[in-house]
Image (cartoon, grey):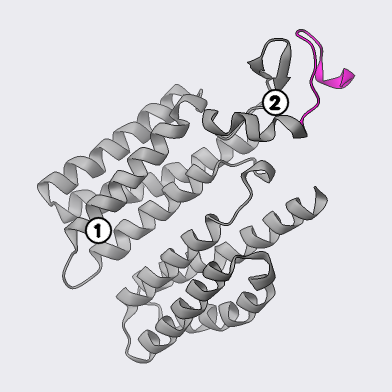
Amino acid sequence: MAEQFERTDILFDAMSPYEDLTESALSQDEQGVEKTLKTLETSSEKIKNFLSHKAVQDLNENIEKMKTAKENANFQLIALCAIDSYKTISEELDISTMKIPKEVLILDYVGFKVHALLAQQLVNWEMVTQTVNEGESQWKSIQGNVSDKSLSDTMKTSIDGMQAAVKLRNVDMLRFAAQITLDLVDLLENFFIEKPKELTKILPGKYIYPLISPRNALSLYPLCPPIIEGQSLSSV
């Protein structure tokens, strides 16, 4: 189990530079792009043993695309490749070792992907729609786990705002809603990190800690000690 947590930590650390690279590319920060790309060439070797063959292949292909794009000052392509790589790693994470739901990470991806798509010379609205729909789907799967009503309502409004902007094909409105979504992702991460360890009942007389989403409940059950109703955590 310790090895699984170590793997998760390593992959989390590997995701961060891709997010940084996306931001640098979107702001056309040439020095930031060059610096982060060099970091990724080194870090990609360190994480390849923790990833599937397909993921390693996708990451390597994107790094080569980004290196070529950098030579051509194609910041838009760099942003797309960087955030797609972020998602590639996030999908390799073991949900049983995570306190922050994977859906939150995908919402982060959605916000940046929308920004990257809107930065293209010709906006692919079909891809934008697909990305926003993915964000809505991810949010719906964890919405019930967010007990902070203000946070939950605001995130729903943000998602609805992206959907409305897509229907209107309003770039400014969509860019604004995507940025609000990114800001709310930070709050969601803090919410799940600081969430009290209340017990969640999944079987008669058996409880486990709060889970990433209801559909993943049973996947964690073997890792948690069964306790009887009313028993405190300290006695487990």
Left or right, residue 150 beside residue 51: left
- What amino acid is found at the position of numbered circle 2 in the picture? Lys
Left or right, residue 98 beside residue 123: right
Which residue of the protein is positioned furthest toward the front in this rendering?
A: 53
Picture mark count? 2
Q: Is 234 in the magenta?
A: yes
- Magenta stretch, residue numbers: 224-236
Is residue 10 shown above or below 75? above
What residue is rendered at 36% in x and 85% in y? 69
Q: Which residue is mark 1?
A: 127
What residue is rendered at 79% in x and 11% in y? 228
Q: At which x and y percent is residue 74?
A: 31, 82
Left or right, residue 199 beside residue 27: right
Q: Quadrant of residue 67?
A: bottom left
Q: At which x and y percent is residue 166?
A: 18, 48
Identify the secondary structure beneath mark 1: helix
Left or right, residue 34 beside residue 116: right
Which residue of the protein is positioned furthest toward the bottom in this rendering?
A: 71
The residue lying toward the viewer, choosing from 31 and 101, is: 101
- What amino acid is found at the position of numbered circle 1 in the picture? Met
Task: Classify the position of the C terminus by image quarter.
Answer: top right
Q: Which residue is mark 2?
A: 197
